[in-house]
Image (cartoon, coloured by chain):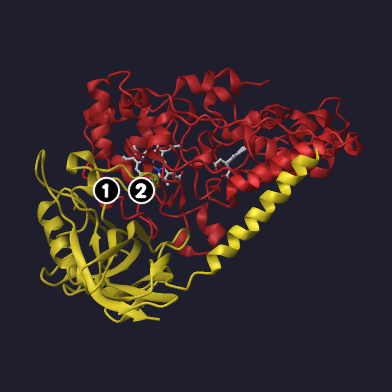
Chain colours: A red, B yellow
Amino acid sequence: MKNLINLICLALLFSSCNESEIETYTQHVPTPLALEIPPLFADNILPPVIPINNPQTVEGVALGRKLFFDTILSGDNTQSCASCHSPETAFSDSNQFSTGIDGSLGGRNSMPIFNLAWNYDENFFWDGRTFSLESQALQPVINPIEMHNTWVLAVADLQNDTQYPNLFFEAFGTTTIDSVLVAKAIAQFERTLISANSRFDKHLLGEITLTTSELNGFNIFMDESKGDCFHCHGNANNPLWTDNKFHNNGLDAIFTDYGLGYITGDPADNGKFRSPSLRNLQFTAPYMHDGRFNTLEEVINHYSEGLVNSPTIDPLMKNVDDGGVQLSNSEKIDLKAFLLSLSDEEFTTNPNFQAP
Amino acid sequence: MKSLKLIVAFTLLFLLTGCEENEENTITHGSLTINFSHYWDAEKITSADFNATTYTNESNNILTISQLRYLISNITLHKPDGSSIELLDHYLVNLEGLSSNTSITISGTAIDTYSSLSFTFGFNETDNVENYIDLNSASWNWPEMLGGGYHFMQFEGKYGATGTENPFAYHMGTARVSTGVFESNHFDVSLEGFSTNENTTIEIKMNLEQWFENPNTWDLNTYNTNLMSDYNAQKMMQQNGASVFSLGEIN
């Protein structure tokens, strides 16, 4: 059935191309660009989410990349997406809270950007408040504590630029720019940001052998009575290293940030945040939604003996009365070594991901 | 140019006639919807009850539920003549509000009278060694050190008096006898038969209370977390599971 429809479309395409009366209408068809899906992903998890109305194209991705690194989108032309999401920090930043163009500090730690096409539920941000990458991309530009612009002004700047109208034409077949097309292009670029080449990936592919310490750490991660991290942070068969679900991992007794609770309005969701991926921790410090921990030692100590009880704490947080599962010093060292084996240096230096 | 247009016309014609042919058949197949519903004895449980409604089990543990997901496989209809139709390879039921999965419609089910419906709770040994991308994507894997494969169930919540609750994580899967020695832990469920028509809906009920009793009275003060590697706990789950399912309404 699909083939038939394709055939008809193809036929229609051919027929219209050859008609002389519509030769003045030069329709531009951007070049399709299939996502390069890493073998570990293809073998183990469901395909990425790519909306039908925003297929990946060479021109779309190139435009999205230019926009992502361009300060033109911000109110005073000083800030780009990359100011808070830079390649060398796995598209996060190294501040606890990011500073917007007016110098205002947000209350949340910048999130890294990789493998987001595999967030099947498509709930983005720490609290999941936005559905789909396209609608996410609309927000930073007009967020007063981030790029503090309006879409009318941002689009006008792009429209008056010497290059952008033509680039939009190549990507979307129109020189008339609007916020939706900006978001589509950025989302296309973001979907190409795939990280799958850590030491642990190479170990799974049989290319390298991990150290004893890294392997011990993986066992602690997978052991219900030790780390018990795998229920929320993936496993060898889930290369995302997150469940992309919302949990309270025992950070606070009293919440200053309700997280998911703000969005659902359900007190049972207060203090829940989306589990971050454990890939690229080497580059994404500080950690947690509010960047409260500067080191992985602090994170591990939190799970080992720093847990704090609260009504919505996840049932998987054990021995809360004692602060956690009490890992020994050597177990902590091994767990850290394993966590770092999930970092993918190549991702941060990939030439396709740098400023164009 | 003209010839191209002809091709288009022909393909369109082909398409239309293709559609008509199907309608000549008499209706022999219908859709079967399976709704998974959850109860504490006779009291219905939905995700709205999560973290809110309290239940008391046979050991007098007062508990609330925060998550319920379970895997069933080889969902099969049996005919009186002994033949059978597999409806589904496997299905992960999830009661959670945001991404719940409690109903599935199978189209093209032969309209007939069936003598029973059966399924496996979890995976049997052969199925449990396959790689399932949908289950991996749900982080449903069971650790290799415990025999690998997949979880059969994640039933989580808290028990005890308000303010001093403790968590329980009733996770079921392959049972580990000792290091490197494992025992399969699935069980088979067979429910009574029914007749189907063009649009049939059946209800498969799980009575969660039964996980805590019959034959083993379950005390959450003894068995709460770290149950995955606990052979006794795993076997008690398997035994108690035998009485949790029943067939509900058929429409």
Residue A143 location in percent, x, y? 70, 44
x, y percentage for residue A308? 35, 50
Res. B148 image quadrant = top left
Going by the numbered disc 1, the residue's amino acid type is Tyr
The residue drawn where x is 10% and y is 56% is B232
In the rendered view, tell whether residue A63 sits above or below residue A288. Answer: above
Residue under pointer 1? B150
Residue B111 appears in the figure: yes
Q: Chain of mark 2?
A: B
Image quadrant of residue A222? top left
Q: Is residue B243 above or below residue A166?
A: below
- Residue under label 2, please give it: B135
Q: Are marks 2 and 1 on the same chain?
A: yes
Q: Left or right of B183: which side holds A221?
A: right
Q: For this rendering, which residue is in front, A252 or B208?
A: B208
The residue at the point 48 percent across, 28 percent down is A195
Closer-to-camera residue (B23/A167): B23
| Residue under the image location 46 percent in, 73 percent down | B27
Chain of the residue displaying label 1 = B
**Earlier-in-chain disc, 2 versus 1:** 2
Snapshot quadrant of residue B115: bottom left
Q: Residues within 10 Å of mark 2 (few under 14, many from 20)?
A: many
Residue A306 placed where, x, y %?
A: 33, 43
Numbered disc 2: secondary structure: helix
Q: Is residue B40 left or right of residue A189?
A: left
Which residue corresponds to the image point at 57% horizontal and 35% vertical from the top-left? A191
What quarter of the picture does the C terminus of chain A occupy?
top right
Do labels 2 and 1 touch, CB within 8 Å? Answer: yes
The kind of residue tagged 2 is Leu
